[in-house]
Amino acid sequence: MIASSKRSPLTYLVHATVLFLVVIWTIPTAGLFVSSIRDKDQLSVSGWWTALATSEQRIVDRAQEPKAQVQEGDRFVIRGNLLGESAGSITQFGFSSLEPEAFAVGTVAEMRKGQTLEVTANGDYVLSSPTPWKGSRGQRIFYTAEVPPRFTLDNYREVLSAEGLGQSFLNSLTVTIPATIIPILVAAFAAYALAWMRFPGRALLVAAVVGLLVVPLQMSLIPLLKSYNLIGEFFGVGSKTYVGIWLAHTGFGLPLAIYLLRNYIAGLPGEIIESARVDGASDFDIFRKIVLPLSFPALASFAIFQFLWVWNDLLIAMVFLGNNEEHLVLTGQLRELLGSRGGNWEILTASAFITIIVPLCVFFSLQRYLVRGLLAGSVK
């Protein structure tokens, strides 16, 4: 008789935790996507969770200019439509900012000097006056409209058609790819040395690496920039170049990279390393032929983190590259497009999805190799 297996409470807890993490990540992402394809007027007055419901908007518009008036009998009339080609219906209207919802649609509002205003639900309006309309601007009309949900790709078109976006995309790739590869190369050598090579002061170096993890990035930016400028001036390297930002990202990423890779490499079976040394392999051969293939999962994991960090970085790019169009990265270009006040939500949401396309491609491509590296390491 085979005993029926029962899942432990810990298994259910793990599944519930994973489901919770998926939900709290998916909901904001879904909201960001829905906001990016909504009409900007609706986006500014209601949340994304109301995207499928009719929204109520309070709008102020102007009638046609007095030169558009026509004489009908003994009155001078201006006709037009407030909604234009937009779908929706008007519920209330007014001609004063003090009472923007004073009248229901279909009623005739008495204005001054015998003038009247009538607005219908479909947006048609009629301005009537016993004397000719004067002035160069049309009469202001306040109205409340119920607008059905509208979805559009205009937000993405506005972002993608921005001048300089393509160049800033290439600039981000120019910054991110070397700034991801360089710290991985340096950290892999350092991690192997700290894990398997015996030399004086190794424990102090490990402690120094751990201590550098807690150094605030903002505190070290300006001293690092001044040091780079002094050294660059000696070697004839400009201050606002890609070399500076590559070195900056390498310096800021090395402590975490060395810490993660050193812990992983130190956990590799010592018998493999000792057997290779008995066979006469040098440390470089051991590192290149044994440690690197077995450490690919850790290398891929750090590559994902480093790529995401550098790709989404704005602060370091502004400090080491500046705001010139030749070196402006994608995050900086989108910041310029958004404006200083950050009120254009439609630009912000569409930009967010444009910026995550490349990181998502990197994540899913490295995830496949990550699983392969884990299996290869277990077999070896």
Image: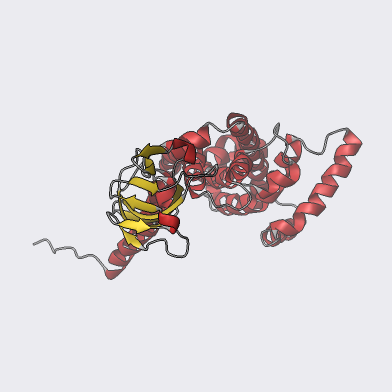
Between 304 and 225, the one lying in front of the other is: 225
Visible in this render: residue 65? no
Q: Residue furthest right?
A: 234
Q: Position of residue 202 (x, y in %)?
A: 73, 56
Visible in this render: residue 354? yes
Between 186 and 20, the one lying in front of the other is: 20
Image position of 165 with respect to 214: above or below: above
* Residue at image location 50% in from the left, 36% down from the top: 158
* Residue at image location 42% in from the left, 61% down from the top: 100
Horizontal side, residue 109 vs residue 299: left or right = left
The image's colouring method is: secondary structure
Image position of 22 with respect to 149: above or below: below
Q: Position of residue 143 (x, y in %)?
A: 38, 55
* Residue at image location 85% in from the left, 43% down from the top: 229
Q: Position of residue 13 (x, y in %)?
A: 32, 67
The image quarter in which residue 377 lies: top left
Image position of 189 with respect to 256: above or below: above
**Position of the C terminus by quadrant:** top left
